[in-house]
């Protein structure tokens, strides 16, 4: 049967509409206007325009009918509603708001990310080398773009653009490149923390050295066991710090040490070491001293010159909060924080110090050194001075009633420089076993940031999902089985039978 010319024109018009819809849907799904998408849209538009032009008389005739006028009104209202929704959608895109109800704010950018990305001063390009796009990565980048116009993103097929892939040293599909200027970082994981760490590395010009003192059984940055510091060592490197160990028994603190760390010495420091630390600070140096309970590091005179008192005690906390972390009274929990850049964003977050001594400002009236007590325990705690008594109890006039200070930050001018010192009465909080508990990791890294004068890095970092698995004993399992399988069904059946009997 021979096809009618008008029918062919009509079908061509509908095909054009279909091509337009298909091209637009491909663009919406892929969020990228490719050559094929453009071809669909152009072909569709041409067919629709040709169909209307060749069938112009029939189209104008249709618009003269009463039913068409009613349909037109409906169409206008429909278009108006769609336009309103489009405007709302556009405003929502331009002024992005997200309601995150998770306790860890898993779907919101962390304070650290916001500070780093919004403070960018140079362009950063993120390139995904793969055949298909990663919707999760693209959404993450969109969040970054809302914070800074310095971020750009592109997906590239390494087979289509082999020269560019070779230029960046791409070896496999799925690799992500973060580049700025002449610096490039290769990523296999693209979580928020991975991206932020890469942005830091390509935008920071100088690598600062954090030096850890060794020779007195201090905690090691190379140790991956429970008492090691390999986790914080990795965190420091992610923030563009270099870490190394130094021996200051017979030599002064190296000049390239931006921050000196003494992490839980088990034996007293030699007098030459204490002298070298003092010289380093007097020259405008920065140091973190983490001193555990029941040790004597021989730092009394040095700390006295900084108006800091290190208590010969152990802090006990009987509030019961420590049980949340499987710890007892000997693990005080800090929930009160001083007004200081290190802890300004903690907002009563908990810090767990597994075995701590008190550290406080010696004389609050002195003004030659600026001091702040960083973190304190609750009122249900005290500093126990009788370290040999297994039955510890608070003794008025002998022990210090809580809240007890567990750390002090101090600074003073040394010529044109500013020397900084932080003393914390525990080193276990930064160990691999406890660094991921609550705000422990933030406390350590924020302290290093402040000492290194990298205040823009001080923040609350992204949190991981809390494990909410419920562990039941065999008795509890049996009880739940009896209640749900026996007693509850029996109660329902008995109630139904009783009601039937009464109404019979």
Image (cartoon, rainbow, N blue to C red):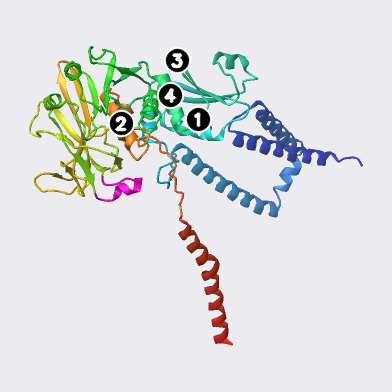
Task: State which mark lies toward you, 1 or 2.
Answer: 2
Which residue carries the number 1 mark? 190
Indicate the secondary structure of the residue bearing disc 2. helix
Indicate the secondary structure of the residue bearing disc 3. loop
Q: Are there few (<14), some (14-19), or many (20+) residues within 10 Å of tag 4? A: many
With respect to residue 477, does 244 lie above or below?
above
Which residue carries the number 4 mark? 199
Which callout, 1 or 2, points at the residue further toward the start of the chain? 1
Give percent across and percent down for residue 449.
Answer: 30, 26
Q: Residue at x 70, y 49 (%)?
A: 64
Task: State which mark lies toward you, 4 or 3.
Answer: 4
Q: Are there few (<14), some (14-19), or many (20+) residues within 10 Å of tag 3? A: few
In space, the residues marked 4 and 3 are separated at their CA atoms by 12 Å
Q: Are there few (<14), some (14-19), or many (20+) residues within 10 Å of tag 1? A: some
Which residue carries the number 2 mark? 444
Which callout, 2 or 4, points at the residue further toward the start of the chain? 4
């Amino acid at each position: 049967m021979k096809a009618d010319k008008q029918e062919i024109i009509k079908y061509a018009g509908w095909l054009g509409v279909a091509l337009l819809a298909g091209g637009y849907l491909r663009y919406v799904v892929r969020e990228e206007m490719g050559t094929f998408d453009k071809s669909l849209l152009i072909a569709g538009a041409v067919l629709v325009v040709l169909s209307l032009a060749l069938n112009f008389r029939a189209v104008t005739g249709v618009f003269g009918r009463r039913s068409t006028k009613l349909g037109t009104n409906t169409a206008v209202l429909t278009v108006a509603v769609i336009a309103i929704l489009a405007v709302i959608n556009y405003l929502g895109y331009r002024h992005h708001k997200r309601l995150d109800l998770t306790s860890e704010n898993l779907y919101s950018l962390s304070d650290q990310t916001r500070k780093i990305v919004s403070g960018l001063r140079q362009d950063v390009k993120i390139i995904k080398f793969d055949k298909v796009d990663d919707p999760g990565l693209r959404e993450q980048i969109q969040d970054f773009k809302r914070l800074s116009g310095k971020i750009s993103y592109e997906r590239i097929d390494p087979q289509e653009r082999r020269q560019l892939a070779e230029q960046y040293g791409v070896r496999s599909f799925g690799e992500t490149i973060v580049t700025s200027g002449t610096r490039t970082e290769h990523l296999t994981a693209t979580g928020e923390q991975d991206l932020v760490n890469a942005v830091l590395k390509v935008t920071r010009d100088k690598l600062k050295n954090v030096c850890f003192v060794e020779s007195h059984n201090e905690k090691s940055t190379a140790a991956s066991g429970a008492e090691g510091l390999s986790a914080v060592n990795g965190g420091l490197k992610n923030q563009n710090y270099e870490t190394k160990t130094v021996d200051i028994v017979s030599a002064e603190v190296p000049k390239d040490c931006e921050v000196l760390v003494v992490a839980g010495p088990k034996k007293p420091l030699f007098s030459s070491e204490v002298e070298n630390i003092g010289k380093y600070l007097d020259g405008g140096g920065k140091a973190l001293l983490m001193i555990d309970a029941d040790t004597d590091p021989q730092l009394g005179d040095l700390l006295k010159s900084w108006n800091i008192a290190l208590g010969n005690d152990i802090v006990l906390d009987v509030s019961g909060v420590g049980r949340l972390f499987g710890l007892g009274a000997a693990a005080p929990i800090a929930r009160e924080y001083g007004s200081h850049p290190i802890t300004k964003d903690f907002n009563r977050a908990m810090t767990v110090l597994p075995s701590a001594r008190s550290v406080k400002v010696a004389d609050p009236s002195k003004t030659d050194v600026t001091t702040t007590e960083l973190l304190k325990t609750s009122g249900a705690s005290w500093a126990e001075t009788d370290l040999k008594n297994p039955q510890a109890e608070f003794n008025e006039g002998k022990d210090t009633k809580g809240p007890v200070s567990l750390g002090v930050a101090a600074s003073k001018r040394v010529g044109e420089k500013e020397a900084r010192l932080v003393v914390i009465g525990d080193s276990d909080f930064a160990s691999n076993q406890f660094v991921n508990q609550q705000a422990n990791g933030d406390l350590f890294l924020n302290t290093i940031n402040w000492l290194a004068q990298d205040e823009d890095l001080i923040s609350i970092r992204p949190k991981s999902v809390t494990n909410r698995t419920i562990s039941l004993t065999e008795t509890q399992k049996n009880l739940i089985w009896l209640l749900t399988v026996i007693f509850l069904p029996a109660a329902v059946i008995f109630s139904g039978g009783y009601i039937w009997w009464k109404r019979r």
